[in-house]
Image: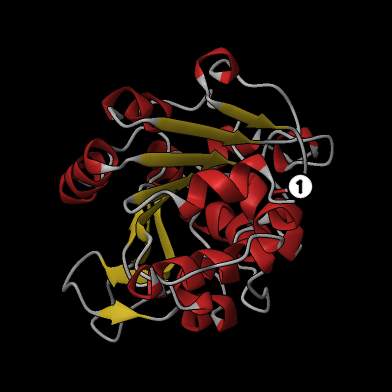
Amino acid sequence: MHSPLQILLDASRRIVFFGGAGVSTESGIPDFRGTDGLYRQKYAYPPEEILSHGFFLRHTEEFYRFYREKMLPLSAQPNAAHRKLAELEKAGRLQAVVTQNIDGLHQKAGSRTVYELHGSIHRNHCMRCGASYPASFLAESQGIPRCTCGGIIKPDVVLYGEALDEATVQGAVEAIAAADTLIVAGTSLTVYPAAGMLEYFRGKNLVLINRDATPKDHAAQLVIHASVGEVLGAIRVTPVSEE
C-alpha cells in the first residue's frame, strides 16, 4: 500500500524542496528556536544580537568565540532526508533544494542544485582583498581570523541586518514558481523573508512535513507531523526515465 506522499511524488516531475533547521537537527545540529535551541541558551549577549551585522563589526572577537563554538558543526553528516533528496534529484524528479540552513549538508549528500538563502559556513572571504578560506581555517584560528593580507575574514552567512543574496533569491523564486510539487519541511515558516517565498508557488501539490503545526498547514494538500528524515527516508525513488 503506497502512502499518500509516495503516490504524490510518483506523479511529480518538478519537485522543489524548501527546508529549514528541522532538516539538520537529525544530523545533530541544534535549531535556533526549539526546546534546546541556541536561542534558549545563556550567553553574555543574546544569540540574535551576536549573529548580527552590527555585533560582528563592533565585537568581532566575541562574535568568533560564539561562532566557533556553536556555528561550525564540521563533523556533522547528512541524514536520511539529505540523502533521499539527492537521490530524487539524480532520478530527475527533484529540480532544486531551497534551504535556510548554512551547514552544507545537502551538497555533502550529493545534491547539486541548492539555493542557500542564508549563505554557507563553508564559504568565507577576506573583507579587504576578497581571498577565500574554508570553514576549517576559521575553526582552527584563534581570536579574530585574518587573511595573509591582514584583512578580517568574514563568513558568507547572512547575519541579522544583512540582505539575502539577490541571485540566490532569484534562483529560488524561479524554481519554486516552476514546481508542480513543493515539499516544505523542518521549518516553522515564521522567518522572513525566506518564509514568504512560498507565495510564489503555483503548482498543484503543497506538502508540509514538520513536527509542529505551521501557519500554512491549512493551505497544504498533505500535512505530515513527523520526523523529516523518517518520512523522506521511507520514500521509494523511481527514475523518470523508467516510466
At mark 1, the secondary structure is loop
Tell me if 8 is positioned left or right of 171 in this view: right
Res. 170 image quadrant: top left
Position of residue 119 measured from the top left corner of the image (x, y, whole percent): 37, 55
Of 231 and 10, the residue lying toward us: 10
Report the residue at 48% width, 83% height from top.
137
List the single residue furthest toward the right: 35
Position of residue 115 measured from the top left corner of the image (x, y, whole percent): 32, 55
Res. 125 image quadrant: bottom left
Of 121 and 232, the residue lying toward us: 232
Which quadrant is the C terminus positioned in? Answer: bottom left
Q: To which residue does mark 1 refer?
A: 227
Callout 1 environment at 10 Å: few (<14), some (14 to 19), or many (20+)? some
Position of residue 121 measured from the top left corner of the image (x, y, whole percent): 46, 65
Res. 124 image quadrant: bottom left
Q: Is residue 144 visible?
A: no
Position of residue 120 measured from the top left corner of the image (x, y, whole percent): 41, 62
Of 143 and 162, the residue lying toward us: 162
Q: Describe the colour scheme in one phrase.
A: secondary structure
**Of the residues shown, which amino acid type is indicated by label 1?**
Ser
Tell me if 22 is positioned left or right of 238 in this view: right
Of 160 and 60, the residue lying toward us: 160
Tell me if 153 is positioned left or right of 73 in this view: left
Q: Is residue 68 visible?
A: yes
Q: Is residue 176 above or below residue 215?
A: below
Q: How many discs mark residues in the rendered view?
A: 1
Report the residue at 39% width, 37% height from top.
54
Tell me if 188 is positioned left or right of 107 in this view: right
